[in-house]
Image (cartoon, rainbow, N blue to C red):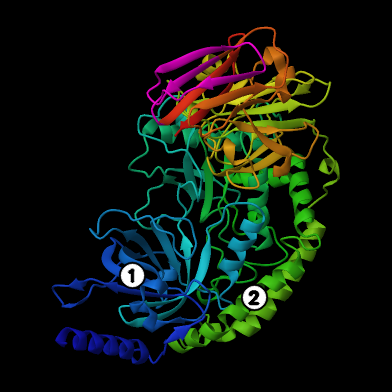
Amino acid sequence: MKNKSFLLLFFFLFLCQVSFAQQTILNDSNLPIMVISTDIDPDTNAPTDIPDEPKVLGSMQLIYRPDGSRNYLTDSTNESFLNYKGRIGIELRGSSSQALDKKPYGFTTLLQDGVSNNNVSLLGMPSENDWVLNSLAYDPSMVRDYLSYTLASNMGNYAPRLQYIEVIVNGDYKGVYFLTEKVKRDSDRVNLKKIADDDNDFPDITGGYIIKADKTTGGDEIAWTMPNYGGWDTNFLHHYPKTEDITSAQANYIETIFYDLADQTNPANTSIIDGYPSMIDIPSFVDYMLMAEFASNPDAYQFSTYFHKDRGGKLRAGPIWDYNLSFGNDLFVFGFDRSFYDVWQFDFENRGAKFWRDLFQDETFNCYLAKRWFELTGANQTLNYLTISNLVDGYVALLSESQARELQRWPPQEGWPTVADQAENIIEMKQWIQERINWMNTNIGSSSNCMDVPVPDLVISKIHYNPLEDVGYSSKELEFIEITNNSNQVVDLTGYYIRELGISYQFAANATAAGNQKIYLCSDATVFEAYYGFAPFGVFTRDLSNNSYTIMLSDALGNTIDQVTYMDSDPWPEQADGEGPYLQLVDISSDNSLASNWIASSQSLSIEDIATAQRQIIVYPNPTKGLITIEFDFSNTEALEFSIYNSMGQSVGDFLVHSSNLEINLSHLPSGFYYYNIKNKGVVISRDKIIKN
């Protein structure tokens, strides 16, 4: 009873502290509520202050009712409404934002030992351990960062996911923040291959890397500098691997990539063999520039500007970060006013590395920039004014309740930005956006020379993303993609590449595909030839996702030739997910973006007998209690070889199939999993597993 009374008293005092310490009352909210308590400092017997670094230990509760209804502070005692309850390490973050009384934070979710990382999903975002609490610094609208990240994501690029929340730290109501993902190498963030300290030779040294142009805050060291057209240098920093982890060979490699880019853009070398199109993913640079310029972000290009490069892949721009100074907003309190609607930021006070302006002035790049701009600003598109206006209205409505508490907690100070001006600021921002769109429409250039770029009829026709493991072969080693030239014409493949992060492949100079040729890209050339009986066309780096992935085949300039987004669940054939068959397009001329046009197939990949594409082999029943039947629907002049193996890879039976229908009795075998191969003329044409009950 004493313990219960103490807990009730503590909880009451806690509520009082939240309510009265800053005269801001937070009992419930339409937003999730985050409650952070740092550990007690033994020297002061009070909660530990949160420094810039290092992180200090604490505990966090994230209150969020999964049905989307109101969240209550009293929900902190109800496990059903706690999106997270556990340990964290927390520190202050940011640069100029730390000058404000309302501080931004970075935190890591930890296991109970207070040391080990704890990868968790927060508010529906993919599991990770590194998170950021953005304090909405210097933005009286409260929406600029949120809007920008959403627009970048809706354009088809990775941008940190985010969610508005209200935050309490050590009983002190801190106001409205957004919880967001830290820019990090992760399969659900910047999806790059992990690079090790012994990856110092080709091709391993080629990735993955995350580089940023930025300030040197938080103890960061300058990796290299590049001159800009303003007469000063732009600093480049290692983000991944960190400065203390990257080897000298790796540091030299990635630095050389940037200097090569500078060389190939001034003067512009547009060769798809050795010019800048062979080095960079043009669509990502186009989209990054469009976001930076559309928002007129004075920090873009020189600060918080990220680049990334996967193993075997091109250099890419992004993700975007730190867009509070945008859409007409700046550090007015410090005398800055740079976010104008009628300037190009790369050519104004903020210029960044020279290659940004050089790219804009190149006719080829500028054409694709203009083309993309006019696509995105069309009716109902991402950067259309009405689309953006509706997004902003939604954010304002969502924040209408918490904005009042934010203002109560952080009342206006003369000369400093305040959310008291939100309504007026939103009106001004919308007007600014209209003027910006009009100005860019007039000044961005012409897209006429790249509007209707012809692309060949290359079709992604087979995908083996999760093969069944076989004796001596892992699933990943057996992966492949088939691309069919669905024409009678020879296609020059020079510079073509797989564009989406996940796997990387770029066709070599002068590579070709003959008319009607099927080419195979695989994960391991030696294994592919040994297992499937012929050499592949090329080898991609990394592995196909076992869940879902967009295979996008593009030409050297980024024009999409074909793309397929497969999934491991209905309506896609689920047998292709680790059961043996692969995905096969039924009709080469059908729409391969539709799951209904794909089947799970176990046919041979023999290039000598490509006509067997539609042949079907059926083994049933499966599972079986003993008898199985083998049927195939094509004439055969030689006996098929049927071999069955146990889970240890040991042969338990070999049979010759002389007719189109054969029964085999397996009743003498113990219950369990077995695997079979069917060969025709020595070539494996089918393989799968059998469950013996």
| 10 Å crowding of disc 2: few (<14), some (14-19), many (20+) | few
**Residue for badge 1:** 60
Residue placed at 59% from the left, 57% from the top?
Answer: 350
Instruction: Indicate the amino acid at tag 1.
Output: Met
Res 429 → quadrant? bottom right
How far apart, in angstroms, are the residues tagged by discs 2 and 1? 29 Å
Q: SS at mark 1?
A: strand
According to the image, label 2 marks what residue?
394
Pick the front one: 500 or 3: 3
Q: Quadrant of residue 349?
A: bottom right
Q: Position of residue 78 (x, y in %)?
A: 36, 76
Q: Is residue 523 above or below residue 241?
A: above
> Which image quarter is the C terminus in?
top left
Residue shown at the point (46%, 47%) measured from the top left: 186
Question: Horizontal placement of 509 versus 542: left or right?
Answer: right
Q: Residues within 10 Å of mark 1 (few under 14, many from 20)?
A: some
The amino acid sitting under disc 2 is Gly
Residue 30 makes an appearance in the image: yes
**Percent coordinates x, y for residue 3 in the rendering:** 17, 84
In the image, 245: left or right of 524?
A: left
Quarter of the rendering occupied by the N terminus = bottom left
SS at mark 2? helix
Residue 348 appears in view: no
Front residue of 458/594: it is: 594
Q: Is residue 402 above or below residue 301?
A: below
User: Residue 489 location in percent, x, y?
Assistant: 83, 21
Q: Are marks 2 and 1 in contact (CB under 8 Å)?
A: no
Q: Is residue 646 magenta?
A: yes
Per the rendered image, the range of residues in magenta is: 642-671
